[in-house]
Each structure stands twice: as C-alpha cells, then as structure tokens.
Image (cartoon, grey):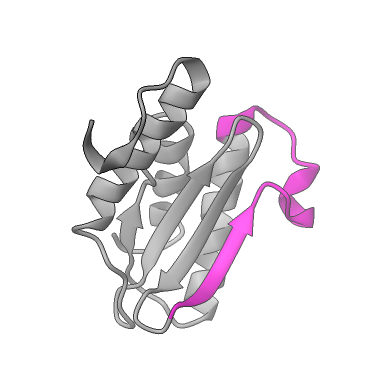
Amino acid sequence: MAYGQKILKGDAYKRAAIKRRHIRIRKRIAGTAERPRLVVTRSNRHIVAQVIDDLKGHTLASASTLDVSVRGGEGDKSAQAKQVGALVAERAKAAGVEAVVFDRGGNQYAGRIAALADAAREAGLKF
C-alpha cells in the first residue's frame, strides 16, 4: 500500500483510505491569497468548513455544525451541511474572499459534501 499505511480492517481501513485520498488531492491543491482553499472535514455527527490561505497558514473563515447559529437547526445532516455552506460563504465574503479552491478532504463528492459546496456556490462563493 502506498503512503506507508498498514492494512487495516473495518472503520480503521475506511479512515486510512480517506487519508490516502486526501494526501493524493493535496498534492495538486493549494490555497493562495487570491484563491484560498475551502476545506471540508466530515465526521459521523458534524461537518466543518474552513477557508485557509496555505501560503500564510491562516484560517480566514470557518463554520461548523457546532456553531451556535447552526447547532439547534432542524433537519437532517444534509440540511445542516447546507447551513454550514451558506455560513462559511457569508463569512468568507466578509473576509474579502470571492473565489476558493474546493478541498473535499478525501471524501466522495456526494451527500453532505455536495450539499455544503452547492450552498456555498448559491451564497456567491466561486469555485
């Protein structure tokens, strides 16, 4: 196996596969001052989105389902991901960011990841 990962079983194998895909993606994607990186981190219960300038190593904007405005939100996890996407886009635009590079973090572009990206696009963030 590539990247020095051991052969694992069950959930550990799944997490290792996601990590391998993320490393593969990060070889090609980097955030700059003009186009920072929109990183999505997903767990079973929560989703976190950050806009990061990789050259400076600074987070410009972030939002998650743990935020007070989203935490008590109704709906399923996809609906909460949409709220997070709209919120991170609003905060990024307030920080002066118009366009981003999307980093799905090794996850498939489907479900909650796609819902977050679509909501960020609808809020005016360019990918």
Q: Position of residue 14 (x, y in %)?
A: 43, 25
Q: How many marks?
A: 0
In this rendering, position of residue 31 left or right of residue 50: left
Q: Residue at x 34, y 53 (%)?
A: 103
In this rendering, position of residue 66 left or right of residue 115: right
Q: Residue at x 73, y 55 (%)?
A: 67
Magenta stretch contains residue 127: no
| Quadrant of the rendered image containing residue 7 | top left
Q: Position of residue 69 (x, y in %)?
A: 75, 55
55 vs 78: above or below: below
10 vs 49: above or below: above
**Residue 2 seen in the figure:** yes
Q: Position of residue 46 (x, y in %)?
A: 64, 39
**Residue 107 seen in the figure:** no
Closer to us: 114 or 27: 27
24 vs 96: above or below: above
Q: Residue at x 50, y 47 (%)?
A: 41
| Quadrant of the rendered image containing residue 38 | bottom left
The residues colored magenta run: 57-78
Closer to us: 12 or 61: 12
Q: Which quarter of the rendering shows the N terminus?
A: top left
Closer to us: 27 or 105: 27
Q: Position of residue 64 (x, y in %)?
A: 63, 52
Q: Which quarter of the rendering shows the C terminus?
A: bottom left
Closer to us: 6 or 24: 6
Residue ranking furthest to the left: 28
Q: Residue at x 30, y 49 (%)?
A: 23
